[in-house]
Amino acid sequence: QVQLVESGGGSVQTGGSLRLSCAASGLPYSSQYMAWFRQAPGKEREGVAVIYRSGSTPRYVDSVKGRFTISQNDAKNTLYLQMNNLKPADTAMYYCAAARGDSRWLTLTPGDYIYWGQGTQVTVSS
């Protein structure tokens, strides 16, 4: 049974930092991409950052480049998202997800992801 459990969300002011964690268990080896998505009220779910579990340069959506860093622990069972210089536009529910085995390279398309966590809220105030 696959489980993805996020933690680390909270409320910060503009310019602040947060580190999200996602504890993963039961993931099949074929699920090689893990990513962070976010969804703000009234908006579509957006891919933020993706990493290849076996190792490669991560991919980021343009709006977070230079501010967010996705990483994983050596055991590859915990995914992180370090978020620096946060802006009000970053306010959203953040989800950890793992892709299906035949996904495109470093995909950030929500439809390519079949395992999802419950989400953790990030609120950035001005």
Image (cartoon, rainbow, N blue to C red):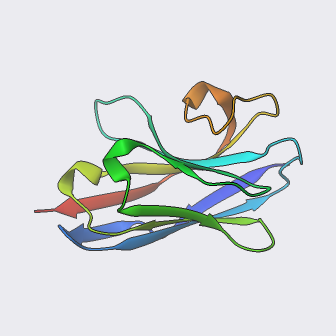
Instruction: Indicate the position of residue 19 as horizontal and vertical percent values.
Output: 46, 72
Residue 54 position (above or below residue 31) = below
Farthest residue, direction left: 126
Instruction: Indicate the position of residue 125 as horizontal and vertical percent values.
Output: 16, 62
Q: Determine the residue positioned at 38% across, 72% down.
A: 18
Rendered image quadrant of residue 6: bottom right
Instruction: Indicate the position of residue 41 as horizontal and vertical percent values.
Output: 29, 37
User: Viewed as shown, does residue 111 lie left or right of 30?
Assistant: left
Q: Nearer the viewer, residue 67 or 26?
A: 67
User: Viewed as shown, does residue 106 lie left or right of 10?
Assistant: right
Instruction: Indicate the position of residue 98 as horizontal and vertical percent values.
Output: 69, 44
Rendered image quadrant of residue 124: bottom left
Q: Determine the residue positioned at 85% across, 54% down.
A: 26
User: Viewed as shown, does residue 1 lie left or right of 56?
Assistant: right
Q: How many marks?
A: 0
Quadrant in the picture for the C terminus = bottom left
Q: Determine the residue positioned at 33% across, 69% down.
A: 84
Q: Determine the residue positioned at 21% across, 58% down.
A: 87
Farthest residue, direction right: 29
Q: Which of 73 and 126 is in front in this view?
A: 73
